[in-house]
Structures are given as structure tokens and as C-alpha cells.
Image (tube, rainbow, N blue to C red):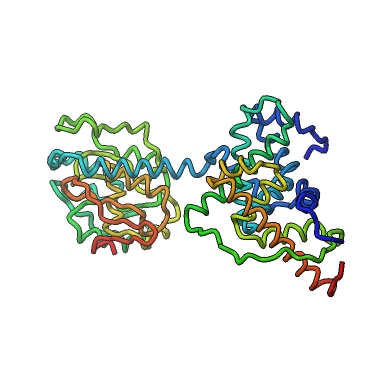
Amino acid sequence: MKLTLYSIDELMEGCKAGNRKMQALLYKQTASKMLAICMRYAKDRMEAEDVLQVGFIKIFQKIGEYRGDGSFEGWMRRIMVNASIESYRKTLRSLNVVPIDDAFDQPSTGFDFSRLGMQDLMRVIQKLADGYRVVFNMYAIEGYSHKEIADTLGISEGASKSQLSRARAILKQEIIKMEGIDYGSYTG
Amino acid sequence: MGAIQDKEFDQLFKDQLEHAEVSPSAGLWDHIATELEPKRKRGLPVFWMSAAAVVVIGVMVALLMPKKDPIRLQGSADEFAAASALDISTAPVDGVQKIAAPSVVGVSSAQTKDIATYESTPLIIAPRFVAQNEKKDVHRMQPNIENNRPVNKEDQFDPEKVDVNKQAVKVSESNVSDVVMANVDTDAQRYGNEIRESDVSESRGIKNVGDLVNYVVDKVDKREKKFLKFNTDDDDNSSLVAINIGFIKLNSRKHK
């Protein structure tokens, strides 16, 4: 196996040419970042890996469409996010009623973020119900506007806003729970 | 720490998760690669597929094939004299004749027993023998081609082209006097126990597509019960007598 590292643009050119070796290298170099995106949106790891496959196939098939505006990695990420959202929308068709939570107060006491690592936050996000999770990801991490979220998911902007605030509340609850178990009672 | 602002809250998640990495499972790339470019493997699968294709076509043709011409009996005695590799030249030869087992010469005892089974059939089959001198025997066994008996054009036989290792080589078109190249496989035992009526068809030459199918299948499938088997009856009509594919086992009674 060659040890030389290719730049992402070199890999991109190789993949445009359909070079299988380059495709494999691009995957090796970017798959874990892509999987993290899928993990945020999916309800479990299995679904995340399915989406990862679909996403990469789309990337390789559509690579001719990348014109160089914006970074190639950013282009890849957008495709992966779209694949994740697509997967979520499919689950909507099959069953889902978005759970109507009891309204619950945001906790007044604070909590310490500094103790929480990436994996903790990932775990907490996965505790959210599907709809809240997707909206929170799109808004807070991907940076979509409520309008964009509404258009993509086929909901109203108001629904997007309320789902976002519910998501935040649940996340805070879960973090407190997590810290409570690990660190005993905590007073801000 | 007071109640955190929404923006800060979001930002904390974003900072940690935006560039997070999670290692994918090991075999994932292979699935992707397969999806991208499904490739067919070269080599053995192609062989099996083409063999299977021959069989499929053979089945279709055999089932749709019109009847062959009726068999013409041999009239001349010359052919028997030349064809017999055995020392029965002194015996009168006319029409149908059975080859008596005791007069068989040069055949191992393991096969003598098998020849006995032939006696009960209405067919004359040359007993299989271990060819000591293959070339000479091939030549001796050829019919007198100068014969101007009516023959089916497709059954002309060229002695030079005989491959003595082939299991079934056509010598003449007549069913009754059909003498074939004996199986020169020196491992006589292998065939000793398997000589039954179903194997008779192999030694009579390839007369129709069913026999061709049998020949191909025989090369490919080394089991006793082949996955597809045709039988050619006295009138050279071919019929499917056995199918043994996977759990499907259909055999005619006499072949079970």
C-alpha cells in the first residue's frame, strides 16, 4: 500500500476519472467524518452505516457535478447530510407520529459542559426522538434556517421552531441526568 | 453557571460534533465498491454458466425436436466382422446377433460380469475393454465405409479423427450394429459397477441433442445421478429421464 498521502483535491480528480484506487483512498480518508454526520441523524449505528454507504455511492456517482465552488469536503458533507435527511424522511412515511411531549420546563440550574466529551454529546443527541433530533442537527450544527428546514422536511416554520426548543430542553434534561449519575448532585 | 443561552447551547454542540469522527465497520467499503461497479468473476463460473446454457438450450431443442428417421437395420455381415474386436469371426453373422459372454477375449473379469447384463437387452453393445493397442483396435473396429447402404449423412465417421479417449464416439448410424469406441479409461473398476441401461446410451454415440446434453452434463457432473439426464430409446427418440438439481430429485423408475 502506498504511503504517500494524497490531498483531497488530488483524490477528487482521481475519483472524477473513475479510478477505483482513488475512490478507496478517498473513502479511507473521509469515512469517519462522514459516519459521524450519519450517526447524528440516524437513530442507531446500523442505520447510520446504511446511510454512509448510500451517501458515498451518491458522492462517487455525482462527482462530475462538483465544479470547485466551495471545498470538496464541504460538498461531500452536504451530500451526506442530504442522504441522512432522506433516510429520516423515509421513516416518516412508514409510521411516525411525532411524539407530543408534555411541556416541561427548562432546568434553571446549570450544568457543566466541560466534562462532556464528543461521545457524551453524541449519545445524548441519540436520545432525542427522530423529529427533534433531525431539526436540532439541521439548525444547530448544519446551520439551516427554519425556512430551509421547513421546506426540506415538509413542515411549517412554526413547527420547526417549536421542535427545536423542545429538543434543547430534552437535551439539557439528559445531560443533567448523565452528570447526576456520574458526578453526584451538582449545584451551579 | 446560570441558564445557558440557546445560542451558546447550540454552539457547544456544534463545536464538539461538527468535526467528530466515528470509525466505520470493516467491511463497509467492499459493499460500496460492489455497488459502484458490479464485476463478474472470470474463470470457473463462466465455464459452469456456459455448460448450463448448453443444457438449457439442449433441453429446449430436445423437447421441440421433430422425430428422427426410423432406424434402418443392418443387412451386411461385413460390418460385424470388421467391427468386432473380439474373436468371434468364426461365428455366423447375420442381422441381430448377441455377443456371447464366454467368447469374449481380452476383457478383464470385472467387465465380463457386466457384459452379461447386456445379454438381456435387445441391443448389441461392444463390451468395454482395456485397449492394449488402441490404434489398431480403433482401426479394426471401423465399419467398411465403402458400403453403399443408405446412411444418414450426418453420421459419417472419419477414423482419423477418432479421439480414443472420448467416451462415446459414433461408428455407424445403425442402432443394432452400433459399435463404439470402448472406453479406454484404464480404470475399469470405476465403470464396472455403474454399467446400467442408463449408461448404455453413452456408449452408443451421440445420436441426438439429448445425448449431447448427456455428454456435456457427464463432463461437468461427476455424480451418479446427474443433474439432468436424457435417455435415447430404440427409435432414437430422446426423453428427459432425470433431474437432480439441489433438492429437486426426479428420476424415472428405472433410473432410481
Mark yes or no: residue B27 visible. Answer: no
Q: Position of residue B220 (x, y in %)?
A: 42, 48
Q: Where is residue B140 in the image (x, y as percent from the top left)?
A: 31, 40
Q: Position of residue B79 (x, y in %)?
A: 21, 40
Q: Which of A100 and A95 is in front in this view?
A: A100
Q: Nearer the viewer, residue A148 or A66?
A: A148
Residue at 57% x, 51% y is A88
Q: In this view, does B122 lie above or below A185?
A: above
Residue at 28% x, 53% y is B200
Q: In this view, does A109 lie above or below B4?
A: below
Query: For this view, does B104 lie left or right of residue A80?
Result: left
Query: For this view, does B193 lie left or right of residue A43?
Result: left
Query: For this view, does B7 lie left or right of residue B137?
Result: right
What count of labels does the image hold?
Answer: 0
Q: Position of residue B26 (x, y in %)?
A: 69, 52
- Quadrant of image for the N terminus of chain A: top right
- Quadrant of image for the C terminus of chain A: bottom right
Residue at 73% x, 48% y is A32
Residue at 72% x, 36% y is A74
Mark yes or no: residue A90 visible. Answer: yes
Q: Nearer the viewer, residue A87 or A64?
A: A87
